[in-house]
Image: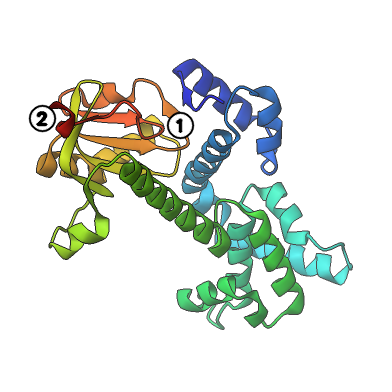
Amino acid sequence: MARVLNQTTYNSLLDSLYKLPFRNRVQSLQKRFPELSVDTIKCVVAQECQKRMKGSHGRLTTSETVETMYKKFKNSILMNEEPGILLRLSDEVGLTPALLARSIIERHYQRDDKSKPAKLLVSTLMKNTALIDDRDLAFETYLCLLEDDEYGPIAEATKQSRGYEYEIYLRMELENCKVTFLHEDHLRMKGYDKTPDIKLEIPVAIDGQVINWIESKALFGDEEVHRGYLKDQLYSYWNRFGPGLVIYWFGYVEDLEKIHQNRIILIRDTLPKNMVLMDQHL
């Protein structure tokens, strides 16, 4: 299944994504793009959702809007509506389920002066909905967390676990290829503050290019994502260690390497099998 997308396919995927209802979009996109990896589609959907929320969250969570949503929720409870009230409200207003539930919790625990409750309290309640003092709100929040693949403690734990899983997988692959390396924990013990996931003790060559370090990203690499990592991480690694490799395990848009033509950072969706080890030529 394809994970490396040309710009035309990627644009087509985004166009289709924006026309679909807020939830359950992956299944529809699978039917429209059967040649694409399911993991790639899931990752693109998640990342676009996060971009959309960054742009619209403030507008969708004004005090007036939250008050309206809270009254709708309380009225639905009084009317004995079917469970899933907040999920349906999420579809209606365009907030992800977890973000909407968080806003409702903040309103429910609003102080007498109408200020928001402490962030620590809200975060604790989101992580353990059994602590919410309203039974209906507790259950509705729990449903929202189960349904939200992008936000909330369940989604965050899943992302962290997936990232660590691919880091471990990369280490195992390098060991199988007899490549010697230091991983992030080793480098931090040596005093490095900015560390790639892998620093090769002996460089390897990939497609004729010497590589000194490898960064593992369990996500899809589009231009915005890649530029962000270049600024925050990858250029620092290049400055300290020289040319390197970033692996976007769920695919990427072709031609991203053109962004940094003067700094060699290869981009792949898996660890290349054609690595040339230095001792092969000794």
Sequence-wise, the earlier of marks 1 and 2 is 1
Q: In this picture, is 279 found above or below 181? A: above
Farthest residue in the right direction?
80
In this orientation, which residue lies closer to the viewer: 27 or 192?
Answer: 192
Residue name at image x 49 percent, y 28 percent:
3
Identify residue for label 2.
282
Give x and y (percent) for residue 111: 55, 81
Mark 2 residue crowding within 10 angstroms, few (<14) / some (14–19) / many (20+): few
Which quadrant of the figure contains the C terminus? top left
Identify residue for label 1.
251
* Residue 26 visible in the current orientation: yes
**Which amino acid lies under the numbered mark 2 shown in the image of this protein?**
Leu
Residue name at image x 58 percent, y 76 percent:
125
Give x and y (percent) for residue 206: 25, 26
Residue name at image x 47 percent, y 47 percent:
54
Q: Secondary structure at mark 1?
A: loop
* Residue 116 visible in the current orientation: no
Mark 1–mark 2 Cα distance, whole angstroms, equals: 35 Å
Q: Is residue 27 left or right of residue 77?
A: left
